[in-house]
Structures are given as structure tokens and as C-alpha cells.
Image: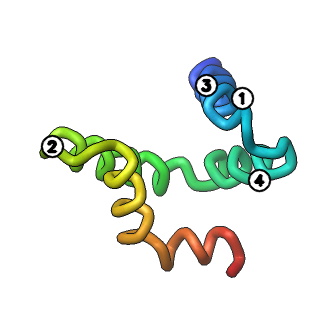
Amino acid sequence: MSIGNFFMKQLLKSKMKDIPESEQEKILALLEKNPEFFTKLAEKVQSKVKNGQDQTSAVMEAINENKEELQKMLGN
């Protein structure tokens, strides 16, 4: 694991402290297996926020736009 990945994992864990640890591990595993997808998702969120949208709705909209791909990753 690179140093960048280590710090990203620690940051995500701190943001997910209210989520059960088993769910945190699933999310982190998805991130490690599909970094390009999550980078693209983060870029979409950033773009929406820069255009004046609040962060929560930007995240929800970006997730909805990529719902099918995310469901495939989750195995649903």
C-alpha cells in the first residue's frame, strides 16, 4: 500500500466513524478495487460544488448518475 493510499484510508475511516466497521471495510475494499471510478465520482462532485450546488446534494446527484455502475460493483 502506498503512503497516499494509507492516508486516504485513514481520512475515510475518520469520516465514517458512525458506520459499522464491517461496512467501512466493504467501502474501503471497493475504493481499492475501483480507484478510477471513485476519482471520477469525486471530480463530478467537485464540479457540481464549484457550480454552486451544496456538497450533500452534489454527492447524491453524482451517485445517482453512476447508480448502475455502483450497483454492479456492489453485486446488486
Q: Nearer the viewer, residue 3 or 24?
A: 24
Q: Quadrant of the N terminus?
A: top right
At 59% from the left and 75% from the top, the residue drawn is 71
Residue highlighted by disc 4: 26
At 61% from the left and 25% from the top, the residue drawn is 11
Sequence-first disc among 3 and 2: 3
Amino acid found under the numbered disc labelled 3: Leu
Residue 49: name its quadrant.
Answer: top left
Disc 1 or disc 3, which is closer to the eye? 3
Residue highlighted by disc 2: 52
At 73% from the left and 38% from the top, the residue drawn is 18
Sequence-first disc among 4 and 3: 3
Badge 1: few (under 14), some or many (20 or more) residues near its Cα, within 10 Å?
Answer: few
Label 4 and label 2: CA atoms lie apart by 31 Å
Residue highlighted by disc 3: 11
Amino acid found under the numbered disc labelled 1: Met
Residue 42: name its quadrant.
Answer: top left
* Residue sitting farthest toward the left: 51
Q: Is residue 13 left or right of residue 46?
A: right
Residue 2 is situated, as x and y percent measured from the top left of the image, at: 65, 24
Sequence-first disc among 1 and 4: 1
What label does residue 1 carry, if any? 1
Amino acid found under the numbered disc labelled 4: Lys
Circle 2 sits in a helix, a strand or a loop, which is it?
Answer: loop
